[in-house]
Image (cartoon, rainbow, N blue to C red):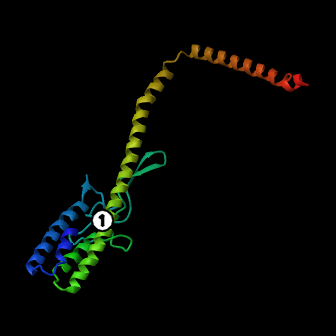
Amino acid sequence: MRELAIQSANASLTQQDANDIAGEITVLRDQLLALANTRVGDKPIFGGYLTNVAPYSAAGVFQGDTNQLTLEVGEQHFVPLTLAGGSAFGDGTAATQDVFTILANLTAQVQVRNVAGFANIEAEIVNLDLATEQVIEARAQTGIALSRFEAAFNVNEFMQERVPAYLADIQDADMTEAIAELQLTSTALEATLSATGKVLNGPSLLDYLR
C-alpha cells in the first residue's frame, strides 16, 4: 500500500490510473481487515476481552476494548494470550495509529489529482510508516510472549516427568533402612561437630609461635 501511495503521487497519472490505484488499496485494506478480525476458536485475538463482536467493523472502526487476555502458567506467573486490544491496528484513540482511518484517508486522497492531494498523500505515507512500526512492535511482543510460553511449557514438561519418579522413589523406600541411614548420618555429623569443636578450642598456630 505504501508503494501504491508513492506511485499515485505523480501528476502524470490519469484520473483512471488514480482510481485503479485506489481500488487496489481498497482490496488490500479489506484483506488487512480480515486479518485484524482473526479468531482463534471463538476468541478474536485483537479485540481485548470482548468476544461477541468482531474487533473492527466493516468500516474499520474499533469495537473491542484495550484489555489483554492472559494465562497463569505458574504461581502468580501470567503470560499474555493476546495483544492488548487495538494495539496492532489502532484502538481509535490518539495512543495508537488507526490503520483503517489512515487507509480510508489515503484512498480518498489518491483520487484527488492536484497539489493539495499530493501533499495529503505524503502526509498519509508518514502515518502509514508509523502504523507499520506499530505492527512490527506488536509482532515483537507476540514473539516475547511465545518465548515465555515455550519456557513455561518446558518447565511443566520437566515437572510432569520428574515428579512422578520422585514420588515413586519415596513411596518405594524401605522405611527401616531409611531410618537406619538417617541415624548413621546423624551420628557421623555429631562426631564431626565434636571434633571440629575440639580443634577450634585447642591451641592455635599463634600459641605455638609464641
Comparing 12 with 90, the one in front is 12
Quadrant of the snapshot with the N terminus: bottom left
Q: Position of residue 5 (x, y in %)?
A: 20, 73
Comparing 183 with 175, the one in front is 183
Q: Residue placed at 37% from the left, 43% from the top? A: 150
Does residue 46 sit above or below 210 in this rendering?
Answer: below
Q: Is residue 203 left or right of residue 20?
A: right
Does residue 168 sit above or below 120 in this rendering?
Answer: above
Residue 10 in sight: yes
Q: Position of residue 142 (x, y in %)?
A: 35, 54
Kind of residue at disc 1: Thr
Bin the neighbour count of mark 1 within 10 Å (Cα to Cα): few under 14, some 14-19, many 20 and up. some
Q: Position of residue 76 (x, y in %)?
A: 49, 48
Comparing 210 with 155, the one in front is 210
Q: Residue placed at 17% from the left, 73% from the top? A: 7
Q: Which residue is mark 1?
A: 132
Q: Residue placed at 84% from the left, 24% from the top? A: 205
Does residue 205 sit above or below 133 in this rendering?
Answer: above
Q: Quadrant of residue 34?
A: bottom left
Does residue 145 sit above or below 160 in this rendering?
Answer: below
Q: Is residue 13 left or right of residue 101?
A: left
Q: Residue furthest right?
A: 210
Q: Position of residue 144 (x, y in %)?
A: 39, 51
Q: Residue furthest left?
A: 16
Residue 62 in sight: no
SS at mark 1 in the image? helix
Q: Residue placed at 17% from the left, 78% from the top? A: 10
Q: Quadrant of residue 133?
A: bottom left
Comparing 180 with 86, the one in front is 86
Q: Is residue 129 left or right of residue 158?
A: left
